[in-house]
Image (spheres, rainbow, N blue to C red):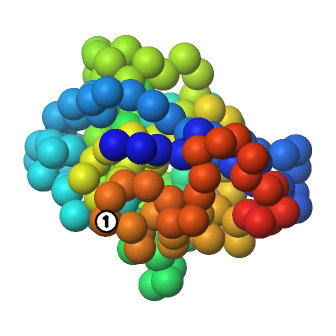
Amino acid sequence: MLLIASSLVLASTSGPAEVLKPWFAEPTPTLVLDRLDGARIDLADLRGGPVIVHFFATWCAPCIEEMASLNALAAQQSVQVTILAVDVGEVDARVRTFFRERPVSFPILLDRDRSAMKAWHVEGLPTSFVLGHDLSPALKAEEPLDWTGPAVIRVLTRLSQRKDGTLAGETTDGNQSREEIR
């Protein structure tokens, strides 16, 4: 499947430029983990709409800020996206305490042994992946991102409108205009 080949640079009004860039992985790594509530989630069961897979840790200050942004995105009616937050390598009790104080409306998954982090080639936290309707790789952010910023909402909306996992109107020649997505 043809995916975007140009970088999408998203400007932030509250900090340095944030980058959401093309992500190519064939195939998308599997993800089957326990939720914080004890249920099990298999990413393969979530086909049908865009999915954000967000790797984080409760000790990571940028992760905490981004978690609030993801929760605000989940509350928006305008963008239909499934969010999975994957805690990396922490004790369940610590994660429970964290989310008791900062509840979110999406599932928290537990990567207790860091196997998902390794399979997805996560090198730092936070790292987020955006998957298309068929769970095909689309985009990756390896730094904090304001998920409710207008440029990000436009990109997610475009992706949610496409059933083939690509972004509508995007080119693959690397000549994407940055102004078009700001």
Q: Amino acid at mark 1?
A: Lys
Q: Position of residue 61 (x, y in %)?
A: 68, 37
Residue sitting at x 44%, y 55%: 166
For residue 72, side relative to residue 133 (left or right): right
Residue sitting at x 59%, y 45%: 172
The reply to whether residue 147 is in sight is yes
Task: List the residue tagged with mark 1.
Answer: 163
Looking at the rendered structure, the secondary structure element under dot 1 is loop
Residue sitting at x 34%, y 43%: 1
Q: Nearer the viewer, residue 7 or 92?
A: 7
Q: Position of residue 141 (x, y in %)?
A: 60, 39
Q: Nearer the viewer, residue 131 or 42?
A: 131
Q: Residues within 10 Å of mark 1 (few under 14, many from 20)?
A: some
Q: Nearer the viewer, residue 113 or 131?
A: 131
Q: Residue furthest bottom?
A: 77
For residue 21, side relative to residue 17 (left or right): left
Taking 126 as reference, is 84 above or below it?
A: below
